[in-house]
Amino acid sequence: MPAGRVGFFCDKPMLPQEMARRLRHDLIKHLDIPQPGQELDLGASRVFLRRLFDSATGLCKTAAVWGFKFRRDDAWKGELDPPLSRIESLCEVLSGREAALRERLRQGGTVPVEVLDLLHEIVAGVSEFEQTCAQASPESGGDALAALDFFGFESSPLSSGVDAKRGGGGAARLPQIPEKSDRLRVLVVDDHLMLVDRLQSNATFIRRFCWATLCDRTCDCLACPERENCPRRRARTASEMVSALDRAHAAGHHVDAILMDVRFDDLDKDELLWLPDEPALNTEDRVKALQGLIIARFLRHHTTFGKIPVVLMTARSRLPEGASSLLKDMEGLQFVDDEASLDTLAARIQSLVQMNREEPAEKNYFWGSSPHVQSVRRQIEMMSLGTRTVFITGPSGSGKSSLVEQIIFPLSGRRNLVTLDLSSIPDTLVESELFGHVKGAYSGASSDRMGLIEEAEGGVLFLDEIGNLSPENQRKLLLFLQDKTVRRVGASNETRRRVDVKVIVATHLDLEDEVKAGRFRFDLYMRFAPSMRIALPPLRDRLADLPEFIDMLVHKILKSSDMQPYVEDFSRRTHHAGTMIVSFSGVLPKTGEHEAVIRFKPATRELFMSYSWPGNTRELESILDTLLLKAFYDLRAAGSMSRIIEIDPYYALSLLGGIDRSSRAALATPSPTGSVQVAPFELGAVSDFAELRKTLERRYLCAMFEACEGDLARMGERLFGDDSEEMRHKITVRMNQLGIHVRALKKKH
């Protein structure tokens, strides 16, 4: 038995279909055939020669070993001998050309056409052997496997586009290695070195990827003088995989993807991850054949690394028997046919990583990298299922409604979403809105009406600004949450019926303080499970996420119906039909022929990063919408053909400074019909200017409310010269946002 091939021999007989799988895996799976006339750099040449002629794992030796084993297997059939003999004879011819091929590549030459023809014939021979095995195997029902279209025929997998090639007779050099920060980080999990050798010799992978390893060295694998046959460039087992991930995590590196083989023949029995819950599969031969899937399932349940994308290096249609039971609850697992070129594999990995990175946005909802928000994300995933009440807190504009609509509701898997903003509806109508009413229940109830709770049957009921609920309606909501039964206002008790509704409540208030002040029921607060509340931070505590947040919001705004006419006009005028790149750093990125840039100058960046954003994400989106509108309008008015869309820092300053001035004006400028004098008072310590503004605004509105004797129409007239219903509603909402309970104040008058 050759060294390194412990897994070649097994005790149980192999069916013909299994013989075909093993021959494909060990003979041609990791073989890249160069294009005719293609030059190989030093690394690619070494991998290519090792893959053909290595004394333990090379193609020629492997064919001889498997030929010896197959013919002594109890399941061997005579009709399998001709295609296998053809493969063996071709490998013998190839072996006879080893010395000449090594010398030619050493001198910087290309692989001779006759060697390429031999390799293609070997691939065709494996295809013929697979088809013969499929016809002879009882498990296949006589269906032949699909014919091969091997990955070397149409693409250039080895050394395509290499920057540093061998010159005629010149010294061999490795391709220049880009900075790690520009590349995706990949961990290879395989019992052989063939896969990582193959990837690290390919120019596409050198340019786009770097490696998570078990090595203590700080240099890149490709620049390491001891990389040849280094076993620490990849992980062999599940435990080594976790160790490599832990090392990367401790070093502050994020592993973007894991590439993993499916069959692990070279692992010893005690190195395997077993399947105690699958007795039918829990044999050494089966576990080795399915080890990649077993490791992937283990990783999926890992608390820290469970979200890392996994790519299995085999076609899904070629998975071993028993794989289907392991694929349950493994959505998102990726398979790449071993016939695919390395260029195709690289594109698949990049697409997969991009989708994984975009997942946090989830329909325009941005998570960011804040540890607190990431913790909230895991909590939401846990709380979304079932009928448990979800309690969300956070300042106004922090995205509570978006979180419910775009994340929690879709995750819940429930039928529909019904929303009620309790700050926008009179308290006297809340009971009817929630529970419905029957005809004649009160004056104006001219017919039966279904309440929102019944409307949300089988779905989600979202009660926003729950802190505005009156004590009496708090009691009624508590009773509903206890037994989930509903009775319409004015109906008899016999009509009470049970409903299946998941309730989500949200508020910008600190309900614990409200409970202490006697404005909110303690028992209802406990029913919300405050220990499990989802607390969204203000934007000023997430400024590190601001660049990515702005990138997401800008693209969202560009797709809005209000902005589309300007975007379409810009595209027609500049002949732009590609993507918009957002440059928040102020540095103009390199762009392609069909790309445009939305550029925030450094002054704008400094302004955004230093502003406290009292209106949180809602304010940020509003400011960005205004800035983009002006930028597109200015280009249109000037008839500019430029594809650089500049965000005006002076206009941004006027917008954000205008917010500050309007707050000060509300405190200092007399109203059209009179003024309110606010007595001097001590503020005490405040956290920042935003808190100072809010405190002063709260004091002024309370004084104005007292001066107008609780008449919101008079307040609207004195403050804004507008006593309309809409203005009264705006004043009520703003006072509630500042923690001023309008209903409580009205009771005093």
Image (spheres, grey):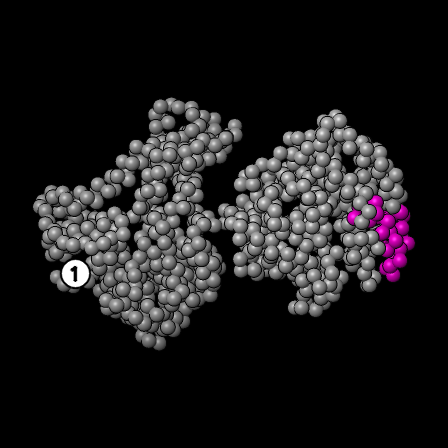
Q: Is 682 in the magenta?
A: no
Please give the name of the residue rendered at 34% of the width and 25% of the height, measured from the top-left corner: 637
Instruction: Name the residue tied to disc 1.
Output: 746
Magenta residues span 57-85
Question: Along the line of sight, which residue is nearer the eye, 284 or 210?
Answer: 210
Question: Can residue 183 be seen by looking at this rendering?
Answer: yes
Q: Is residue 652 left or right of residue 355?
A: left
Residue lying at the far left of the rendered structure: 674
Left or right? Give the position of 273 relative to 218. Answer: right
Work out whether 299 lies above or below 346: below
Q: Is residue 83 magenta?
A: yes
Q: Is residue 304 left or right of residue 606?
A: right
Q: Residue 320 is drawn in which quadrant?
A: bottom right
Instruction: Tell me the SS state at disc 1.
Output: helix
* Near-viewer residue (743 or 55): 55
For image coordinates 80% across by 53% down, the residue present is 3
Residue 436 pos. (x, y %): 32, 65
Which percent across, then down, holds residue 98?
Answer: 84, 38
Image: 306 above or below 228: below
Q: Give whichever of 716, 30 is nearer the camera.
A: 30
In screen coordinates, is 697 left or right of 539? left
- Packing grade of label 1 (10 A; few <14, some 14-19, many >=20) is few
Percent x, y for residue 200? 67, 41
Q: Quadrant of the C terminus?
A: bottom left
From the top left corner, tell me how far across and down residue 310 is, in percent. Answer: 61, 52
503 up-or-down from 608: above or below:
below
Asked where in the image residue 14 lies, by quadrant, the reply is bottom right
Q: In the rendered structure, which amino acid carries the disc numbered 1?
A: Lys
The secondary structure making up most of the magenta span is helix
